[in-house]
Image: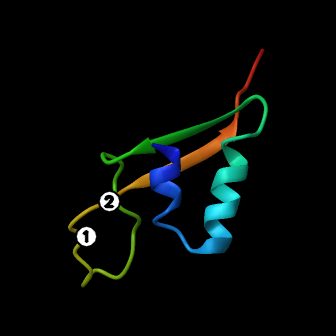
Amino acid sequence: ELAAEANAFTYRHRRMLEGAGKRRDHYVAITDSAPGIATHPGIRWKQTRTVITGPIATP
């Protein structure tokens, strides 16, 4: 799924996302159910897709 998601990005951002998927002790989460970002009130989001990456926190 990560490769399909990466194909929707520009070349630069696609490379960044692909790199994030290869990082040790990091995660990539993809969701269709996250809220849209706050923007101009005249914009009505019809669809949202969120990709979140980050390190895995360990105690």
Three-letter amino acid code at the position of disc 2: Thr
Circle 1 sits on which residue? 45
Which element carries disc 2, helix, strand or loop? loop
Q: Which residue is mark 2?
A: 48
Residue 34 location, x and y as percent? 36, 48
Would you identify the image quadrant in which residue 25 lies?
top right
Identify whether 38 is placed above or below 54: below
Out of 19 and 57, give the one closest to the viewer: 19
Q: Position of residue 23 (x, y in %)?
A: 77, 39
Could you tell whether 4 is left or right of 15 in the image?
left
Q: Kindly identify the amino acid type of the residue bearing the numbered disc 1.
A: Trp
In the rendered view, tell whether residue 26 sits above or below residue 5.
above
**Which picture quadrant has residue 16?**
bottom right
Q: Is 42 displayed left or right of 54 in the figure?
A: left
Query: Can you give x and y, in whole percent of width and height, for residue 8 in the image?
Result: 46, 66
Q: Which mark is residue 57?
A: none
Residue shown at the point (66%, 42%) measured from the top left? 21
Q: Is residue 24 left or right of residue 5?
A: right
User: Seen in the image, is 54 located left or right of residue 49?
Assistant: right
Please say if the residues under marks 1 and 2 sit with CB atoms less than 8 Å apart: yes
